[in-house]
Amino acid sequence: VAHLQVEKPVLLGLLVLGANPQLAMTLLQSRMILALLITYLVMAALFESFAYPFVMMFSVPPAALGGFAALRLVHEISLHDPTLPVQQFDVLTMLGFVILIGIVVNNAILIVHQTLNFMREQRMSPSDAVALSVETRTRPIFMTAFTSIVGMLPLVVRPGAGSELYRGLGSVMLGGLFVSTVVTLFVIPAAFTLFLDLQTWFRGADNPARATPQPIPVV
């Protein structure tokens, strides 16, 4: 992509990794880090910017927190139920966290993409564009999250032969998606508004002429 813009935090991170090759190799050997990196680069290519995907990645930590909380709940229930095998942090459970990364960023993509459309097409201010994008995208976000959560419930609650293999994966994805969906509607708009304000401030400091709003031509 020819128009990618490398932001200062990204350059700082690259310099840190370049000065510590062992740290870079350790991170590259982690499948979780690779999943995060691939997701980030794909979004950077789609949005033609390294900054917007960084904001969207704020939806991943709440998902991880919700996944661990749901896994702990299932583990505690299995400890007190003699009919259930004890749920552990196995390979399929780790796979659930990797899958979760690619799912939870979709809600953030909807909010950020709609905000950019309002700013470019309707010349709205960043704060108004973010508020309107959250208002128009909340219902689709909850609809997709609800259908996904209901579809994964049988993996967690249904007993039977072989159910222990997928119970950890289902609990991680169910808890992570639930927490991330709720938190994303508050964290992503706040973080994106802050980022847009900082972007406007930096551009105004570098070039005061660009900070002055230009009149919209009347057709």
Image (tube, rainbow, N blue to C red):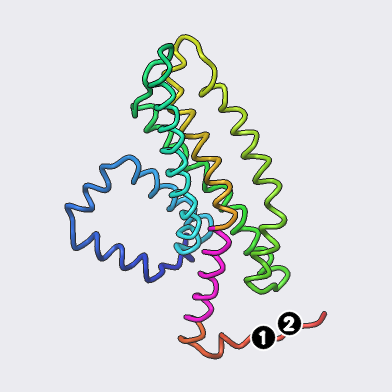
Q: Amino acid at mark 1?
A: Gln
Magenta residues, start to end: 187-202
Q: Which residue is mark 2?
A: 216
Question: Mark 2 touching mark 1, by CB under 8 A?
Answer: yes
Residue at the spot of label 1? 214
Residue 131 placement: quadrant:
bottom right
Q: Residue at x 38, y 23 (%)?
A: 87
- Residue at the (18%, 55%) spot, across then down: 21
Q: Magenta stretch containing residue 117, yes or no?
A: no
Mark 1 neighbour class, 10 Å CA radius: few under 14, some 14 to 19, many 20 or more: few
* Distance Cα–Cα, label 2 vs label 1: 6 Å
Q: Residue at x 52, y 34 (%)?
A: 174
Secondary structure beneath label 2: loop
Instruction: Give whichever of 20, 169 is nearer the camera.
Output: 169
Which percent across, then down, holds residue 167? 46, 23
Residue type, label 2 = Ile
Q: Helix, strand, or loop for circle 1?
A: loop
Residue 2 lies, in percent from the top left, at 47, 63
On screen, 130 above or below 39? below
Main secondary structure found in the magenta portion: helix
